[in-house]
Amino acid sequence: MGCHTFFWVARAVELGHVDRLTSQCDETLTTLTLESTGARRIEVMQRLRSDLGMGLQEVKHFVAQLPARLGEYDHTGKARHIADRFEELGARVSSTRIVTRPDVPMPPREWNEASQVQDVSEALFLDALREGLATTSDEERELRQWAWWMGNKAYRRGAPWVPLSQRSPQVRDNAEALIALCALDDAEHRWMRAELLRELERFEAALALLDLPPLPALGPGLETLRNAARRADSRLLRLPPGSAE
């Protein structure tokens, strides 16, 4: 994103590609491999789409073939940043390093001077929605889901919990719109709807949704979510191993 301009990275026109920068010195390449997604599988899949530009079908195939290579990086810091973004979601990432001597042309100067794509905050995701970046219901759901996740980021890191029902009108409106975009006949969508309702402190509605037949086969995390709703607890959950999301 440059100059506060929103766009889908996957739709950007590729002007060129450079695998490595020219160097007269030996260079360390770090190969990252995604060994497992952990409990937060759906969030890891979304990160594969946003960070690595994969399409939905490509992500599904990638996750089904784990362990699979995330990529090869010529800067240790970049590799560590990528690994950290997946590991903060509970995924397991391994790395191997080899020393190589690159011999490729330097990229044009304007490439180095171009604006860089920046990480997007909750507020910027909501701005993108207001500016009409989403052109389909699937794109709208994806943007709203990312806004929700980014809005909860501070609470995953220990900030005092504030239910969605007590946040700004824009945040509450986003949660309500995301609920409406989640289909009842899709197990993962029902899970998301129930979690949003719980974070909105609408516990009875969340329980009623979780009890609708057929019950979604989402592992032990389903009972964790149900028990939290029964306790009228809206806080973020740490799901048990083996749960789908």
Image (spheres, helix red, strand yellow):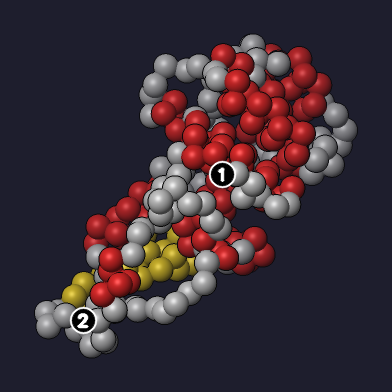
Looking at this view, is 48 or 146 the one in front? 146
Task: Identify the residue position indicated by label 2 in the image.
Answer: 22
Residue 243 visible: no
Give left or right: position of 43 versus 89.
Answer: right
Specify which label sits upstream in the sequence, 2 or 1. 2
Which of the 4 image quadrants contains residue 202?
top right
Residue 61 placed where, x, y %? Answer: 63, 66
Q: Residue at x 68, y 44 (%)?
A: 141
Packing grade of label 1 (10 A; few <14, some 14-19, many >=20) is: many
Residue 127 placed where, x, y %? Answer: 54, 39
Q: Residue furthest left?
A: 25
Which of the 4 image quadrants contains residue 107?
bottom left
Residue 5, numbered circle: none
Packing grade of label 2 (10 A; few <14, some 14-19, many >=20) is: some
Residue 175 placed where, x, y %? Answer: 65, 29
Task: Identify the residue position indicated by label 1 in the image.
Answer: 128
Q: Residue at x 64, y 11 (%)?
A: 232
Q: Tag 1, which secondary structure?
A: helix
Q: In the rendered image of this protein, does residue 161 appear above or below residue 65?
A: above
Q: Nearer the viewer, mark 2 or mark 1?
A: 1
Q: In the rendered image of this protein, does residue 23 appear above or below residue 225?
A: below
Residue type (three-letter) at the residue carrying disc 1: Ala
Residue type (three-letter) at the residue carrying disc 2: Thr
Residue 185 visible: yes
Looking at this view, is 91 or 204 the one in front? 204
